[in-house]
Amino acid sequence: MAPFPFDTVVFDLDGTLADSAPDLAASLNHTLATLGRATLSEAAVRTMIGNGVRMLLRRGLAATGSASDGDVNRASSLFMHFYAAHICDATRAYPGAGAMLDTLAATGAALAICTNKPEALARALIDALGWSGRFRAIVGGDTLPVRKPDPAPLLEAVSRAGGGRAVLVGDSITDAETAAAAGLPLVAVSFGYRDRPATALGAAAVIDTLRDLPETLARL
Ligand SMILES: O=C(O)COP(=O)(O)O
Ligand SMILES: [Mg+2]
């Protein structure tokens, strides 16, 4: 068999490895209700995820009333407190994620995370999913002064994981723009959080299940 073509495989987290929308939606709705706002359906919240917590809050507030910086600041402390306590109540790894990570690790590739979730929350979720120690690098939305779609967090994740030939696996236009800006290929998952079809992300490949990832990467 040909050697595995990637030294480092970087994963987006929300909508790619884990379906975190139920807990994000519950936390957003707790925040909105505390502020006397209407709540939103989980389907609506799914379209608001992917650009970090403040953008999720800004979008949720805008859908239910005013969304000034002051509103976002008030919402942010309520949200962070609640979500940290409910990070993995209903969040689940997508089917096949654990076995896929084992298969990739067995090729010798380094695994890393590049998410717009705040790093502490990303680490807490990864631990809660039983994946402590599986990733050589975890870069969050607040690890650097910039976040995706700036290429810097992705390049930082690659470099912390050991560098070499790298690929991003992600679900959103944010990931597509990040990979393009970093000059890395993207493998898009079709089941995540997006406002357009996965086939419209300009990805090198689109997969419908994480089980297909090792073979897909081997062919790139
Ligand atoms: O918090 C978010 O915006 C979602 O983060 P992601 O980059 O893991 O999709
Ligand atoms: Mg995502």
Image: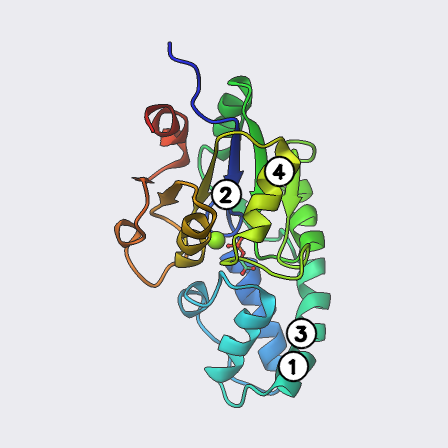
The reply to whether residue 130 is in sight is no
Q: Is residue 98 above or below residue 177?
A: above
The reply to whether residue 127 is in sight is yes
Mark 3 — residue?
A: 76
Which is in the foreground here, disc 1 or disc 3? 3
**Callout 1: CB less than 8 Å from ligand 1:** no
Q: Is residue 90 above or below residue 168?
A: below
Dot 1 or dot 3, earlier in sequence: 1
**Callout 2: CB less than 8 Å from ligand 1:** no
Tell me, yes or no, whether the two marked residues, 1 and 3, touch with CB atoms within 8 Å: no
Check disc 1 and report its element: helix, strand or loop: helix
* Amino acid type, label 3: Ser
Tell me residue 179's x, y (percent). Answer: 44, 48
Q: For this rendering, which residue is in front, 125 or 163?
A: 163
* Disc 1 to disc 4, C-alpha distance: 42 Å
Dot 1 or dot 4, earlier in sequence: 1
**Callout 4: CB less than 8 Å from ligand 1:** no
- Please identify the quarter of the rendering in which residue 136 is found: top right
At 40% across and 50% down in the image, what residue appears?
A: 180
Q: Is residue 8 above or below residue 77?
A: above
Mark 1 — residue?
A: 34
Tell me residue 1's x, y (percent). Answer: 37, 9
* Amino acid type, label 2: Leu
Q: Is residue 176 above or below residue 73?
A: above
Tell me, yes or no, whether the two marked residues, 1 and 4, touch with CB atoms within 8 Å: no
Which is in the foreground here, disc 1 or disc 2? 2
Mark 4 — residue?
A: 159
* Amino acid type, label 1: Thr
* Amino acid type, label 4: Ser
* Disc 1 to disc 3, C-alpha distance: 12 Å
Check disc 4 and report its element: helix, strand or loop: helix
Dot 3 or dot 4, earlier in sequence: 3
